[in-house]
């Protein structure tokens, strides 16, 4: 991670964020996506990212990536909401 980078990416979550995805967070994203076992083919590309140097964590990026994988790989019915709720129970 580059410390002291200029936070120039507007965010609705908090103040401005640093654009990009440091290697540590990229590894966490891959780990989060790989937790979801789904019989799919093709590529998922993460081509947008931003982080907060003080508040972002590898765990947060892995958790969000896991949710992204569920949204991409699970059919759009109540099973998706149930799967996400079950996943989030493990975060506590």
Image: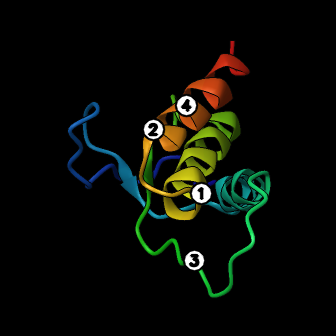
Q: Are marks 3 and 1 in contact (CB under 8 Å)?
A: yes
Left or right? Give the position of 49 relative to 56: left
Which tag, 3 or 1, sits closer to the chain's start?
Answer: 3
* In-front residue for pair 29/16: 29
Residue assigned mark 3? 44
Residue assigned mark 4? 82
Rate crowding at label 3 as few (under 14), some (14 to 19) or many (20 or more) other CA atoms within 10 Å. Answer: few
Q: Are marks 3 and 4 in contact (CB under 8 Å)?
A: no
Residue 9, position in %: x, y? Answer: 26, 55
Foreground disc of the pair 3, 4: 4
Using the numbered discs, state the Cα–Cα distance from disc 3 to disc 4 in whole angstroms.
23 Å
Residue assigned mark 2? 78
Q: Are marks 2 and 4 in contact (CB under 8 Å)?
A: yes
Which tag, 3 or 2, sits closer to the chain's start?
Answer: 3
Q: Secondary structure at mark 1?
A: helix
Rate crowding at label 2 as few (under 14), some (14 to 19) or many (20 or more) other CA atoms within 10 Å. Answer: few
Rate crowding at label 4 as few (under 14), some (14 to 19) or many (20 or more) other CA atoms within 10 Å. Answer: few
Q: Farthest residue to the top: give it.
A: 92
Residue 39, position in %: x, y? Answer: 75, 72
Using the numbered discs, state the Cα–Cα distance from disc 2 to disc 4 in whole angstroms.
6 Å
Residue assigned mark 1? 69
* In-front residue for pair 55/88: 88
Q: Secondary structure at mark 3?
A: loop
Foreground disc of the pair 3, 2: 2
What residue is rendered at 55% in x and 45% in y?
Answer: 67
């Amino acid at each position: 991670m580059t410390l002291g980078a200029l936070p120039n990416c507007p965010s609705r979550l908090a103040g401005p964020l640093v654009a990009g995805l440091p290697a540590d967070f990229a590894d966490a994203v891959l780990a989060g996506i790989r937790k979801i076992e789904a019989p799919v083919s093709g590529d998922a590309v993460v081509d947008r990212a931003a982080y907060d140097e003080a508040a972002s964590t590898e765990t947060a990026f892995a958790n969000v990536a896991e949710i992204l994988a569920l949204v991409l790989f699970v059919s759009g019915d109540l099973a998706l909401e149930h799967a996400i709720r079950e996943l989030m129970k493990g975060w506590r």
